[in-house]
């Protein structure tokens, strides 16, 4: 262990950094795209269900296949890796945003509209705050998956902890495989905890107790 | 204030929910819409603040066609209370109450002040302003729902079964509270309800609807007295017609016809002999046109016997009387409150037409409780017998 750390310590730090970077950028992109899309879907509920199942079907394509698919299009490196991961982050966030907003009590929405909230005010002041716990749950789920999947980025030259795993597989060195897997798992668990705290913080005060009661 | 002109609503599926509705509602009027489920009450109401689009016809608010107005601005200028209360769970009570103020960008101070002012109206302590909706009981929440509609002081308020979700006791309390509030605020109110008692209790005018059409629009008294047709009668229920009866009975219907009188230019001596003949201790005084001008009793005669000779010199001119069209219940109140023995009844020209005495009331009570003094009751008996 000590021997491994003295040989590969710096490399481990760098790879962990890369790993986080790839995952973080992908998830950020995912949130930026999927949340507005989910809101948009909530305005067209009849279409939305079909659109969401379509996205769902796309995502059943095995991740390695997607990664491989991006090589001829974008070459190798961090960008295609991030794009592929971004693609995977979409569905959980999109679906949870949509469900969260659909789930906002209809009478609350009607009251808002009847009081004279514009569409935009209704989204910003009512629907998003009330749907936030559900949206955050989607982001959390996506993040945990993404940190795991990011190990595959190494396959197309994206770097990250996956490099250890691939080296380990190529060189028949189990230590390297463990050196890639364990930190990735720890990262995923940490991210999950962290986001759980964020979720708790973002849940509107008036809803915490009613949530527990429900 | 609010006018419906040939308003029709046809839903996408082809369902006609409201048919050529015509109705004019005055400023300060409290109008209840009532009718069986699906008759178009909610649709009618929601067309006013454009939550539902009108298919045909026009609605005027303050003389202005609502279709010409921006729906968001329009809604901010009309109060709105819904049955499911619909408070924003993530906002404090204060934020909920002044929500429309926030939308209109009121300064914080003004909002705080208004919230404090309003919450006092319903007798809740100001500490409640910092609570969240789920910390309040259903009745308290709906009080806040009503306050929210009052926040920016809109002249027109729409209420869709606002007390429908509450238990009967809370509902009753809130109705009383709200009626009192309305007396102070003089809002124009459109109030949708399922509950006939609620409508009769609160409304200045009750609009009874069926299948998207107005069947009758009248004051509660008028509806109880003259239901437009069998549908209205059935909707009111026989029970209520009986109960409603004493409420709408006029003095003219129960008065006794032959009060003992004396002409104002008779002598006191004659007055006394009339009293003695008829075994009464007071007389109503009439002028030549049979108009009631006063009364005279044995005490007055006793005091003035030596000084005066004619009735109109000593008669008492300040006295209580009622018109024959006034409601019995009001007359009963007067008799009991003032402790008088009788009240003369006059027509529009103040001609004496009858009298209500305490004995009349005793008979009435007796009939109501034990007898069949009311023909409606006989109807019911027959119905049951059939
Ligand atoms: N969005 C809609 N699309 C199609 N039909 C509708 C819609 N909303 C209401 N209706 C129909 O229009 C009619 C009137 O509905 P409305 O809600 O105005 O009735 P209501 O008098 O308020 O009834 P309730 O007492 O049950 O609230 C009903 O037959 C109802 O089924
Ligand atoms: Mg309704």
Image (cartoon, coloured by chain):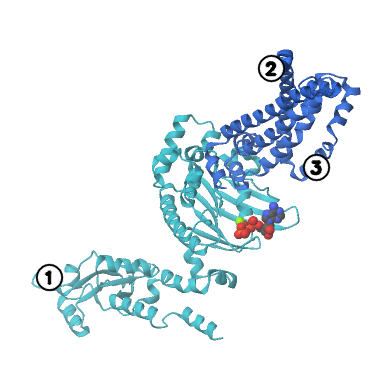
Chain colours: A blue, B cyan
Find out if the beta carbon at label 3 lies less than 8 Å from the nearest ligand 1 atom. no
Judged from the image, the quadrant occupied by ligand 2 is bottom right
Question: Residue A67 appears at what percent x and percent y?
Answer: 85, 27
Using the image, determine if residue B365 lies above or below residue A118: below
Q: Quadrant of residue A108?
A: top right
Q: Chain of mark 3?
A: A
Mark 1 and mark 3 in contact? Answer it, CB < 8 Å: no
What residue is shown at x 47% (from left), y 61% (from top)? B168
Q: Quadrant of residue A153?
A: top right
Mark 1 and mark 2 in contact? Answer it, CB < 8 Å: no
Find out if the beta carbon at label 2 lies less than 8 Å from the nearest ligand 1 atom. no
Using the image, determine if residue B47 lies above or below residue B272: above
Q: Secondary structure at mark 2?
A: helix
Mark 2, Cα crowd under 10 Å, few <14 / some 14-19 / many 20+, is: few
Question: Residue A84 appears at what percent x and percent y?
Answer: 81, 27
What residue is shown at x 39% (from left), y 78% (from top)? B368
Q: Secondary structure at mark 1?
A: loop
Spot the residue most to the left.
B306
Which comes sooner in the sequence, label 3 or label 2? 2
> Gap in Å between the C-alphas at discs 1 and 3?
106 Å
Mark number displayed over residue A53: 3
Mark number displayed over residue A2: 2
Mark 3, Cα crowd under 10 Å, few <14 / some 14-19 / many 20+, is: few
> Gap in Å between the C-alphas at discs 3 and 2?
49 Å
Residue B208 lies left or right of residue B93; in this view the side is: right
Q: Which residue is mark 1?
A: B308
What residue is shown at x 70% (from left), y 36% (from top)? A39
Question: Residue A70 appears at what percent x and percent y?
Answer: 87, 25
Residue B295 in sight in this render? yes
Q: Chain of mark 2?
A: A
Question: Residue B352 appears at what percent x and percent y?
Answer: 32, 73
Q: Nearer the viewer, mark 1 or mark 2?
A: 2
């Amino acid at each position: 262990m000590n021997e491994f750390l003295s040989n590969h310590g710096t490399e481990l730090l760098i790879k962990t950094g890369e790993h986080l970077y790839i995952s973080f950028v992908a998830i950020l992109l995912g949130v930026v795209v999927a949340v507005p899309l989910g809101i948009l879907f909530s305005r067209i509920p009849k279409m939305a269900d079909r659109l969401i199942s379509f996205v769902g079907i796309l995502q059943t394509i095995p991740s390695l296949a997607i990664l491989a698919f991006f090589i001829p299009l974008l070459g190798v490196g961090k960008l295609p890796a991030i794009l592929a991961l971004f693609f995977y982050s979409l569905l959980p966030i999109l679906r949870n945003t949509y469900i969260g907003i659909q789930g906002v009590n209809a009478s609350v929405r009607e009251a808002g509209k009847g009081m004279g909230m514009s569409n935009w005010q209704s989204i910003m002041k009512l629907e998003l705050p009330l749907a936030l716990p559900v949206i955050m749950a989607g982001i959390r789920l996506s993040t945990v998956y993404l940190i795991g999947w990011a190990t595959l980025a190494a396959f197309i030259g994206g770097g990250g902890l996956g490099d250890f795993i691939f080296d380990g597989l190529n060189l028949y060195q189990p230590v390297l495989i463990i050196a890639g897997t364990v930190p990735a798992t720890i990262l995923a668990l940490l991210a999950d905890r962290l986001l759980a705290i964020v979720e708790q913080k973002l849940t509107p005060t008036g809803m915490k107790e009613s949530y527990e009661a429900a | 204030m609010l006018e419906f002109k040939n308003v029709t609503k046809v839903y996408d599926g082809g369902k006609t929910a409201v048919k050529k509705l015509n109705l004019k509602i005055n400023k300060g009027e409290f109008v209840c819409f009532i009718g069986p489920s699906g008759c178009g009450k909610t649709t009618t109401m929601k067309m006013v603040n454009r939550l539902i689009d009108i298919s045909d016809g026009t609605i005027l608010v303050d003389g202005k066609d609502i279709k010409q107005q921006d729906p968001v601005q329009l809604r901010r200028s009309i109060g709105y209370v819904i049955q499911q209360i619909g408070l924003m769970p993530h906002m404090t009570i204060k934020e909920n109450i002044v929500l429309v103020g926030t939308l209109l960008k009121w300064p914080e101070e003004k909002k705080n002040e208004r919230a404090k002012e309003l919450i006092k109206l319903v007798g809740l302590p100001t500490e409640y302003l910092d609570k969240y909706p789920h910390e309040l009981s259903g009745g308290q929440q709906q009080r806040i729902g009503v306050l929210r509609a009052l926040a920016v002081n809109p002249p027109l308020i729409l209420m869709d079964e606002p007390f429908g979700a509450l238990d009967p006791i809370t509902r009753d309390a809130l109705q009383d509270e709200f009626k009192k509030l309305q007396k102070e605020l003089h809002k124009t109110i459109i109030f949708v309800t399922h509950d006939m008692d609620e409508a009769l209790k609160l409304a200045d005018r009750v609009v009874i609807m069926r299948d998207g059409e107005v069947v009758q629009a009248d004051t509660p008294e008028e509806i109880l007295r003259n239901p437009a047709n069998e549908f209205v009668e059935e909707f009111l229920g026989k029970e209520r017609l009986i109960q409603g009866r004493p409420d709408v009975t006029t003095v003219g219907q129960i008065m006794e016809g032959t009060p003992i009188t004396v002409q104002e230019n008779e002598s006191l001596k004659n007055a006394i002999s009339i009293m003695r003949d008829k075994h009464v201790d007071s007389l109503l005084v009439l002028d030549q046109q049979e108009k009631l001008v006063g009364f005279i009793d044995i005490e007055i005669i006793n005091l003035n016997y030596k000084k005066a000779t004619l009735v109109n010199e000593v008669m008492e001119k300040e006295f209580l009387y009622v018109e024959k069209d006034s409601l019995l219940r009001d007359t009963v109140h007067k008799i009991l409150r003032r402790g008088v023995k009788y009240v003369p009844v006059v027509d529009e020209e103040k001609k004496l037409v009858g009298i209500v005495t305490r004995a009349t009331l005793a008979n009435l009570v007796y009939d109501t409780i034990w007898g069949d003094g009311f023909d409606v009751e006989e109807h019911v008996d027959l119905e049951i017998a059939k």
